[in-house]
Amino acid sequence: MTTLLLLTSFLAQETADEAPKGPGTMFWIFEIAFIVLMIAAFWKIFGKAGQPGWAAIIPIFNTYVLCKVAGRPGWWFILLLIPLVNFIIYIILCIDLAKRFGKGAGFGIGLLLLPFIFFPILGFGSAQYQGVLPPAAPLPAAA
């Protein structure tokens, strides 16, 4: 029995007298670096779109500004508070944001899945904000 208890404590890799520890210093360094990177990227994106860059640091207002930059009404940020609906609305916002900067739907999906890569590309890259896109011209009627 004693051998079994010794074996299980060996497999668990912690002893009974050792208290569990929280995240280490490296975790917090990477967390702060990530937050600074995302704030800077949103600051640049908002600046390119003619919105105040400082809006990136105001929690609810930045979502409102993101909706405006993406060409959607500002009240859409309320839809982001509804479970399951928020996922669909965020997909639409990412794709619309990419289109407003002259990028395709694939870039919008990149904004959704890898935001820590694609938002800095959008903010610090050469993409220019194109504003509200004109509606597509109708196809000529066949004669």
Image (spheres, rainbow, N blue to C red):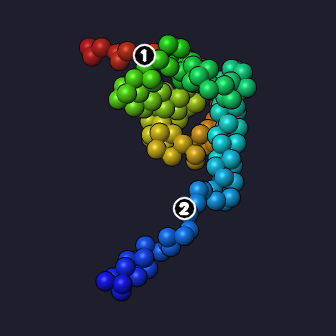
Q: Name the mark on residue 137.
A: 1
* Mark 1 neighbour density, 10 Å: few (under 14) some (14–19) many (20 or more): few
* Residue ranking furthest to the left: 143
Q: Position of residue 55 (x, y in %)?
A: 68, 24
**17 and 135: which one is in front?**
17
**Label 2: few (<14), some (14–19) or many (≥20) C-alpha neighbours in 10 Å:** few
Callout 2: helix, strand or loop? Answer: loop
Residue 97: % across, % down: 53, 29
- Image quarter where the C terminus lies is top left
Q: Residue furthest bottom?
A: 3
Image quarter of residue 140: top left
Q: Is residue 115 left or right of residue 31?
A: left
Nearer to us in this view, 113 or 131: 113
Instruction: Identify the mark at residue 20; answer none if there is no mark.
Output: 2
Label 2 to label 1: alpha-carbon separation: 63 Å
Q: Is residue 83 left or right of residue 22?
A: left
Q: Position of residue 126 (x, y in %)?
A: 67, 39
Of circles 2 and 1, which is in front? 2
> For residue 115, what is the image quadrant?
top right
The answer to whether residue 125 of the structure is visible from this angle is no
Disc with the residue nearer the chain's start (2 vs 1): 2
Q: Is 58 above or below relative to 4? A: above
- Give the residue displayed 49% in from the left and 70% down from the top: 16
| Quadrant position of the N terminus in the picture | bottom left
* Residue at image point 70% right, 33% down: 44
